[in-house]
Image (tube, rainbow, N blue to C red):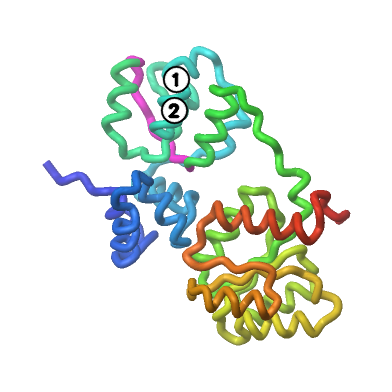
Amino acid sequence: MAKRKRFGEILVEAKVVNEHQLERALEKQKGTGRRLGQVFEEMGVVTERDIAAALARQFGFKTVANISRATFSKELLALFDGDTAMKKLLFPLKQEGNSLFLAMVNPLDIETIDNISFKSGLRVIPCVTTPTEIQSAVNRHYLKIVEQTHEEETWWTVLVVDDQDLVRAAAMAALKRAGYDLLEASNGADGLKVALQQKPHLIIADTVMPRMDGYEMFRAMQGNLSIKHIPIIALSSKSTAEEEAKLLEMGYFDFIAKPINPIRLVARVKHALRINYGTTPPPR
């Protein structure tokens, strides 16, 4: 019998991460109880949607999204309770004949699939989704918690400037989930151009980039009256107190060290917008 591959090995094989990134993630995961995918997200390597797409592509599963917006029967939800759904990160989608379509974060969890199949008498067909999708669906359909919409926040526009595609994508994914309108640029020169044209409410910019780095972009913005007022949060791989002090003294509104933690990023963005603009979004 062939040895079953571990989740990290699957992601390496699918070329979502490399061996070095996997080793770093496994080291960070030790003794924390966190999911490996969560560690990758916090490292800014991939987003949860990247992981779901990779698993689906690698093994031929279907992906599902917007689960919480659908309607489900009481009989379907009664197949297992909300605690099980949240703990195992799964959700019952529909029953067709003797088949149960099940949304799962880890569709390779054979033990859980076999347990549900044994208890329900149904053949389980896994579909891949993200932890955020499962959590929203459980909150709405099991716990009856209606999550607040982000319509009022979609007026806020945030520009993300970083030359590393994966870092930029991870930051944008976290901010998109929070409901913000997003702009992006891969270097300081393009970031300055987008800022002049689109006038975002907030800019998140790496300090080290080609063509024009973050420091040069910042100084150029400070010299232009039309965009000088836009608060800028610096991203830096230098996580020292000296680097943070240097950036804050220059006039940056805030500082976030890499790798990016999505929760910290969204919290800092909300704080920056609230301090600079108040709680009411400006008109479009």
What crowding class fits label 2: few (fewer than 14 Cα within 10 Å), some (14-19), or many (20 or more)? many
Q: Which of 259 and 181 is in front in this view?
A: 259
Q: Quadrant of residue 220?
A: bottom right
Q: Where is residue 73 in the image (x, y as percent from the top left)?
A: 55, 16
Range covered by the magenta-colored residues: 120-130
Q: Is residue 120 above or below residue 68?
A: above
Q: Is residue 161 visible?
A: no
Residue behind mark 2: 85
Mark 1–mark 2 Cα distance, whole angstroms, equals 6 Å
**Residue 155 lies within the magenta run:** no
Label 2 is placed on what type of residue? Ala
Q: Where is residue 21 in the image (x, y as percent from the top left)?
A: 34, 64
**Residue 123 lies within the magenta run:** yes
**Quadrant in which the N terminus is drawn:** top left
**Quadrant in which the C terminus is drawn:** bottom right
Residue drawn at (39%, 59%), measured in percent from left and top?
16
Q: Which of 54 and 170 is in front in this view?
A: 170
What crowding class fits label 1: few (fewer than 14 Cα within 10 Å), some (14-19), or many (20 or more)? few
Q: Which residue lies furthest to the left in this view?
A: 1
Q: Which mark is residue 81?
A: 1
Label 1 is placed on what type of residue? Asp
Q: Nearer the viewer, residue 281 or 138?
A: 281
Q: Position of residue 237 (x, y in %)?
A: 48, 73
Kindly indicate whether the residue at mark 2 contacts the one at mark 1 (C-beta within 8 angstroms): yes
Q: Which mark is residue 183?
A: none
Residue drawn at (44%, 61%), measured in percent from left and top?
43
Residue drawn at (69%, 69%), measured in percent from left and top?
253
Q: Where is residue 180 in the image (x, y as percent from the top left)?
A: 69, 53
Q: Is residue 45 above or below residue 222?
A: above
Residue drawn at (53%, 59%), measured in percent from left and top?
170
127 sits left or right of 242 in the view = left
Classify mark 1: helix, strand or loop.
Answer: loop
